Image (cartoon, helix red, strand yellow):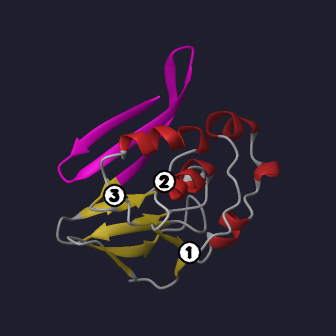
Amino acid sequence: MIHVEQQGNVLAVRMSRSFFGRPFWWTTAYWVDGLLIDTGPRFAAKDLCRALQKLTVDQIVITHAHENQIGGLPTLLARYPTAKVYVSRRSLPLLQNPPSASLQFYRRILWGTPQPWLGPVTILDEIGDCITTPTYGFRVIETPGHTPDHIALFEPTQRWLFSGDT
């Protein structure tokens, strides 16, 4: 199940598996000015591509390496092969070798198991790193807690905070 909502210049794409016709445990990817924040789970990647079909994706930021944030990455990059991928230094090993065997059963059922990603990435390794789009500048903020590798993006002019799962 997918739900798309335009919130000003931000496109929010909510994704969920359905059980008995009802959505269960939503996850959200955001698109702003060519920047995609998270890729959603593997099972929803084609739906996310359809939701973004009239838009460009120049950059992808992964907030943390859970399967409901990274699962769609291979499919999204097949659709947008020139998109630059940003991850935190702590996310990189998890992106390259997802701990699929140790995933809790409910996580495998809800979001599926992500494929390893061995393609090129840009490492975000400093507090204050900035990701820019043609219109906006997003400051990278380390936000460990939910996971040790978690980051958030803050756009100071608009006062937007994309906080992943924190």
Image coordinates of residue 77 in percent, x first then y, are 52, 59
Gap between marks 3 and 1, in whole Å?
Answer: 19 Å
Question: Front-most of 68 and 116?
Answer: 116
Q: Nearer the viewer, residue 78 or 64?
A: 78
Read off the residue under disc 1.
121
Q: What residue is drawn where x is 62% and y is 40%?
A: 111
Residue shown at 53% from the left, 65% from the top: 150
Left of 140 or right of it: where is 46? right
Image side of residue 157 versus residue 37, left or right: left
> As shown in the figure, which amino acid type bears the numbered disc 1?
Val
Position of residue 162 relative to residue 136, above or below, is: above
Q: Is residue 149 visible?
A: yes
In this rendering, the answer to whether 32 lies above or below 52 is below
Mark 3 vs mark 1: in front: 3
Q: Of label 3 and label 2, which has the lower sequence position?
A: 3
Residue picked out by circle 3: 56
Which residue lies at the image location 60% right of the left edge and 62% below the top edge? 147
Which residue appears farthest toward the top when viewing the image? 20
Residue located beneath label 2 in the image: 79
Q: Is residue 166 visible?
A: no
- The magenta segment is 1-30
Label 2 vs 1, first from the N-terminus: 2
- Badge 2: few (under 14), some or many (20 or more) residues near its Cα, within 10 Å? some
- Which three-letter amino acid code belongs to the residue tagged 2? Arg
The percent position of residue 146, horizontal first and vertical second, equals 56, 58
**Residue at (58, 68) in percent of width and height:** 149
**Hey, which quadrant is residue 57 in on the image?**
bottom left
Q: Is residue 19 magenta?
A: yes
Q: Secondary structure at mark 1?
A: loop
Mark 2 secondary-structure assignment: helix
Q: Amino acid at mark 3?
A: Thr
- Mark 1 nearby-residue class (10 Å; few <14, some 14–19, many ≥20): some
